[in-house]
Image (spheres, rainbow, N blue to C red):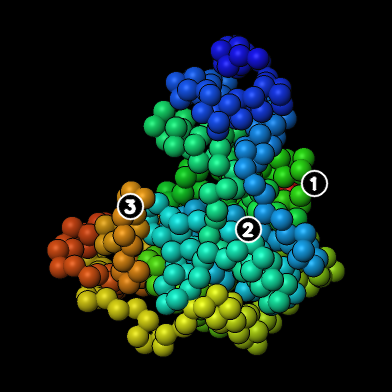
Amino acid sequence: MRMIDIIEKKRDKHPLTQEELGFFIEGYTAGRIPDYQVSSLLMAIYLNGMTDEEAAFLTKAILDSGETLDLSAIEGIKVDKHSTGGVGDKTTLVLAPLVASAGVKFAKLSGRGLGHTGGTIDKLESFPGFNVSLTNDAFVAQVNQINVAVAGQTAKLAPADKLLYALRDVTGTVPSIPLIASSIMSKKLASGADVIVLDVKIGQGAFMKTIEEARALSRLMVSIGESFGRKVTAFITNMDEPLGFAVGNKLEVLEAMQTLQGQGPKDLTDLCVELGSYLVYHAGLSASLKEARDQLLENIQSLKAYDLFKTMIEAQQGTIPKRETFVQAEHVVAVKAERDGYVEKIDALAIGLAAMKLGAGRATKDDVIDHNVGVVLNKKVGDVVGEQEPLAFVYANKDDIGEILRDIQTAFSLSADAVPKATLIEEVIEH
């Protein structure tokens, strides 16, 4: 078998076999196939697409390039969640202890973030001493003991994906539905879960800009999951405005804690309860989605979910500082409305980039995150606002933020007429 033959076959719009895709991934991971040939194949895939079967074959080849997490020692059904990312997305911080409080085994490996703010692991490291590097035995033991663990990804899981993504990033082939789907699903399948929910974001602050793109990606990921015997549900959710109010690591952690105490934003609460209800139901721990929703809402009100969050932090050697001293920024500056009106739009991407410029995120993998900085919205789409009323508050540890303040100001579009609240969940896709 030769790589040139595989490239020409895909160039001519013919489907590739499991053996051909396995040969390509194994050879590239081993260093026998050069970047220029892989780049050529990636572009052929980008231009000509893949069948669902091909995408499943590619996923398996990437999955087989490294180790898989053995969760067989965890009792019961294991669940996991993946989000395609967005501004203010602190869902895992709420969802993990919430579903675990209903008896579900939530075993999650998360990553660090490039972009607006840190990833889930960066946010959890807001807690002094929090250990993200659990051994497999410690990870399994913790899930068996308290139903939940969130740890950092290991480079040994699906290493081919990291190699491919680095090449896609510099060859213009990132926005390919089958390549995105195989990347996401290879890591989810390697993590060992039986039931998975996918939160596919659309809108200005998301990678997917249209409902059609999000629908195609969701449908393919669900299909791949089903071909591996997993129960996968995809939610297409709105990211035209940030999720919740807080954008920034400690600020988002604080908001997640407030949500688990029944004091969080409605959109974040609603999303986590809805995602969680599907996990609880498909794990077989409720008779219906409604029963699962009711249980999760009760666990928020009773503080059972919040207590489990604290237990998880402590189990991984973290400490929870007092709320009033948790976020320590030198400056807190209000961005005020220049006129009366209703909030018509909030440019989520502009808010996210502003947070990154403050130091809340990474432009490169070597950047150091400032956990204390970010943006907290004071208004959401549909809210009424008066002249000189705060639209948002900026938490900063540097003095020269005039341009950032202006960016946030222009991120808000006001209307003289009343504006409806944004729709959060656009569609739910199952097999």
- Tell me the residue at 44%/37% (across/down): 166
Mark 2 or 3: the one toward you:
3
Pointer 2 with pointer 1, Cβ within 8 A = no
Estimate the x, y position of residue 151 in percent, counting from the top left: 56, 64
Estimate the x, y position of residue 267 in percent, counting from the top left: 53, 67
Which quarter of the figure has residue 52?
Answer: top right
* Mark 3 secondary-structure assignment: loop
* Mark 2 secondary-structure assignment: strand
Whether residue 9 is visible here, answered yes or no, is yes
Which quarter of the figure has residue 313?
Answer: bottom right
Per the image, the residue denoted by label 1 is 229
State the CA–CA distance, disc 2 to disc 3.
27 Å
State the CA–CA distance, disc 2 to disc 1.
16 Å
Q: Amino acid at mark 3?
A: Asp
Camera-side residue: 381 or 8?
8
Mark 1 is surrounded, within 10 Å at the Cα level, by few (under 14), some (14 to 19) or many (20 or more) other residues, namely: few
Per the image, the residue denoted by label 2 is 81
- Where the N terminus falls, by quadrant? top right
